Image (cartoon, rainbow, N blue to C red):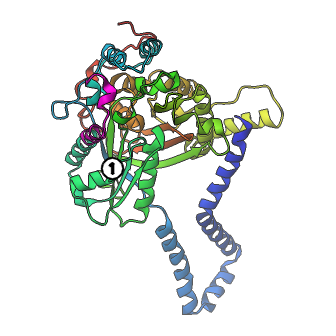
Amino acid sequence: MSSSVQPMRVKAAHQRIVDNFQPVLLVYLAAASLVALMRLGPEELTSLVRELQPVHLFFAGLLPAAAVIVYLMRRPCTVYLTDYACFHSSFNHPLARIPMASFVEHNKQTPTMNERSIRFISRLLERSGLGEETCLPAAHNFVPTHEYCTLDNARAEFELVVFSAIDDLLAKTGITPDAIGILVVNCSLFCPTPSLVDVIINKYKLRSDIRSMHLSGMGCSAGLISVGLARNLLQVAPRGSHALVVSTETITPNYYVGNERAMLLPNCLFRVGGAAALLSTSPVNARFRLKHLVRTHTGAGNDSAYRCVFQEEDDEGNVGINLSKDLMVIAGKSLEANITRIGPLVLPLREQLLFALSLVARKVFRARIKPYIPNFSKAFKHFCIHAGGRAVIDELQKSLSLSDEQVEASRMTLHRFGNTSSSSLWYELAYMEAKGRMRKGDRVWMIGFGSGFKCNSAEWECIQPAPNADGPWATSIHRYPVVIPDVLKH
């Protein structure tokens, strides 16, 4: 564990003490009172009771009752996931798949791309872990592609993906649009006017008093940020309120036409996708319970972390997303910081103790031993690791000592749907459910990374598994898992 993480560990411990100060104080006072009473003999206790006036008895009962009521009122409401839905191309929501050969051929027709860039794209796709059924926007069906990456086509892509996911979600839950009191949308690189939340409000005729937010520029971890924001808003909303969270990334306006290799990567990895999730403080028909959500940001005073996912212009003035060669190192440090905070919340005491002993041995006694990596399999049954690319999944599997089966959902999601940005975690959860692996009481760990640089994670507890495999995997789950070669030969 790097020394830079130590202040964060101290800060996390301090925050836990502050957050639980009131219940700890009440327990201490109650215990102290009980001990004092036990020290009194029977005669002293009887004499004390006889001397008490009715008003004393009244306040003796009132004050503890008032303290309990205040505690219950201030205690955060439990937030539940009623259900979720992911966009997938189908007869009702048509979107043509684009095989790798077609993608490479379309790039050849972009006049600003040179032959060296085309060879790089071809080699990258062969090693990307993506399959032949991923989907790109309708604009990518035309040549030259960049001429069709218009504002109208970008809006059309957003509406197709998001409206399809929301329609499926409302049909699954039976919730009417006027029951939604909170709307949070995250889409990093497409931010038109009117905003994307306004597009949804107009389409579904949502309430005039709805609390709506659009998060942009937050990267692939924005889905969990949106969940966290919706959770916080539900705390101050009437009990039983519903919050709609929509996560997507619009690909159409972000097609890079230059020759910088670091900026060509997003063209090759990102694909169309989106998800809609309904959160509520009502447990009625809930399928998951949100246990914890932890956010960590490592970009404060760290320029390499801040700039490792950066939108900029190349030397020719072409706009794109530059993915730094240090991305994996920075992601590893960000994950380390997040583990430091979520570990004490979810890990069994034995794992926490082993980790603490390892830390003391290395830092205090200067022992030359490897850092102890907590066994998160003791805390979680399922893992949803952001399907950002094969290298991302490989790094997290190594860092967390996970088995191939534990990262299967991430690899298969990348193969079938590509990197769908913030919505990829929901496709992975859907994969596990479509495989019939989810059971009541199972705990799920979602981990997302985003620009800035951020690592966010959430713990969910399953209340009611999906009754069937309907969803994004309905037509393909029988073919998975598949063997993904190191290099795909056409």
Residue 175 visible in the snapshot: no
Q: Dot 1: within a 10 Å radius of its alpha carbon, few (fewer than 14), some, or many (20 or more) residues?
A: many
> Considering only vertical position in the picture, is 346 above or below 381?
below
Quarter of the image holding residue 298? top right
Q: SS of the residue at dot 1? A: helix
Q: Position of residue 236 (x, y in %)?
A: 42, 66
Which is nearer the eye, 425 or 357?
Answer: 425
User: Horizontal placement of 252 versus 383: left or right?
Assistant: left
Q: Residue at x 63, y 30 (%)?
A: 373
Q: Position of residue 430 (x, y in %)?
A: 33, 34
- Quadrant where the image shows the C terminus: top left
User: Horizontal placement of 347 versus 113: left or right?
Assistant: right
Residue 58 visible in the snapshot: yes
Which is nearer the eye, 32 or 354?
Answer: 354
Q: Which residue is mark 1?
A: 196
> Considering only vertical position in the picture, is 3 above or below 131?
below
Residue type pointed to by label 1? Leu
Which is nearer the eye, 160 or 237?
Answer: 160
Q: Residue at x 25, y 30 (%)?
A: 138
Residue 159 lies in the magenta-colored region = yes
- Quadrant where the image shows the N terminus: top right
Magenta stretch: give its range.
Answer: 142-160
